[in-house]
Amino acid sequence: MSAELCTRTEKSIGNRGRPAAVLLVFISFVLGRLYQTFSVEKTMSVGGGSTGTRVVDGTCVKSWRLHGETCQAGVEAAKSFEKVYDSGFWQSKGTASDFKKLGSQFYYHDTHQAVNGRQCLTFRQSLSGTGSNKGVASARSLKYLAKVVIENKITSVLDAPCGDANWQFDDFATDSLPVYLGMDIVQSVIKNDNERFCHHANKRFLQWDVALCSLPKWSTAQTSRMPFELVHMRDVIQHILLESGCSALQNVVTSGAKYLILTTFTGNSVVTNGQPNWPISKPGQMSPYDLALPPFSLPKPVDCIKTHEVGDPSFEEDFTCLYRLDTPEWSTWKNGHQKRMALARALHKKAGV
């Protein structure tokens, strides 16, 4: 075959191949658009769904779906906790001011303070309060949460309230959970959490009032809707009204969750004005509730640890306890909700709040 013939043959083949090439490009474009439409969906509002494992064009893409009704937070409670964050009430005005200046960069910014006249690096502070500072304030809580996740082979955790998620992911067991949902009543906190962890396919954050709304469920493309296995409620019941605390616990126990981690107090620390579980007058205040006593009357936990180490600046005599919810005792407990609510109202009336 001559060189000229080879040239003509190649041109002929090339001309015949162009329609096929154009068709392939068109098919690739269509398939790409379909993939983005049906597989790569934006972070959803409650009630929708999304799948995927990447961040595309700045859009939050998650590896699991969330299912549930929208939850309108209680106005009084939401405003009370918003003030706590805006004022730095549980931390310091300086911390709140630094966050307003830095935004999400606050959590990637070294903190220094004067110690004996020298500037020393300190553990990262939290807008959620000194008890959520990284380091000694949260070390025992983190270790215990990770231990529960590992020993019970837990794959899904609902964290309420999650606050600013300052310490929860400082262990591989918690950071790598296949499914993590953080919920808080303060919208600005949730907005910041979603911004910081948008690129984490396993994590979602949602404004939610656990005292008012039943808990959502989750699924993946391969599974049906299911409850979260573990609900983590650190330092929350003691900061809300007795009735709200009873409602929140009822919503958790009826959600189908198998495990619950709670903060509780015991002993003399729970007695105020001669009355155990003395109620607070508004959300955001604090009372050292013993959750084994009325109006809560929780069944016995699986085990407990002291939440804080001696020497912790935020030291309180509270305990972190693990409860197994799929037992006959908890089935009986669920049926006493109305009685507990009536008792909570009576205690508030007695206290004049």
Image (cartoon, rainbow, N blue to C red):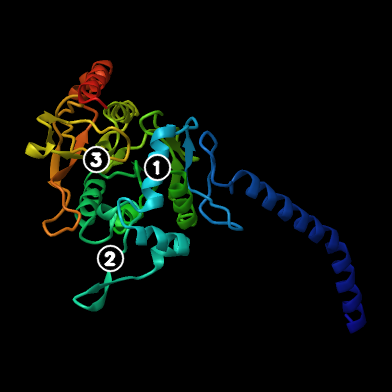
Instruction: Work out whether mark 2 precedes mark 1 in sequence or the reverse, and give the earlier one.
Output: 2
Residue lying at the far bottom of the rendered structure: 3
Question: Looking at the image, which residue is at 39% across and 68% down?
Answer: 109
User: In the rendered view of the protein, which quadrant contains the N terminus?
Assistant: bottom right
Q: Is residue 240 visible?
A: yes
The residue to which callout 1 is attached is 184
Q: Are marks 2 and 3 in contact (CB under 8 Å)?
A: no
User: In the rendered view of the protein, which quadrant contains the C terminus?
Assistant: top left
The residue to which callout 3 is attached is 286
Question: Looking at the image, which residue is at 49% across and 40% down?
Answer: 65
- Number of the label disc, if any, that sits on residue 123: 2
Question: Looking at the image, which residue is at 51% across and 36% down?
Answer: 46
- Mark in the foreground, 1 or 3: 3
- Tell me how far mark 2 sits from mark 3, CA to CA: 25 Å
- Mark in the foreground, 2 or 3: 3
- Tell me how far mark 2 sits from mark 1, CA to CA: 23 Å
Instruction: Work out whether mark 2 precedes mark 3 in sequence or the reverse, and give the earlier one.
Output: 2
Residue lying at the far left of the rendered structure: 268
Q: Determine crowd level at label 2: few under 14, some 14-19, many 20+ residues with C-alpha closer than 10 A.
A: some
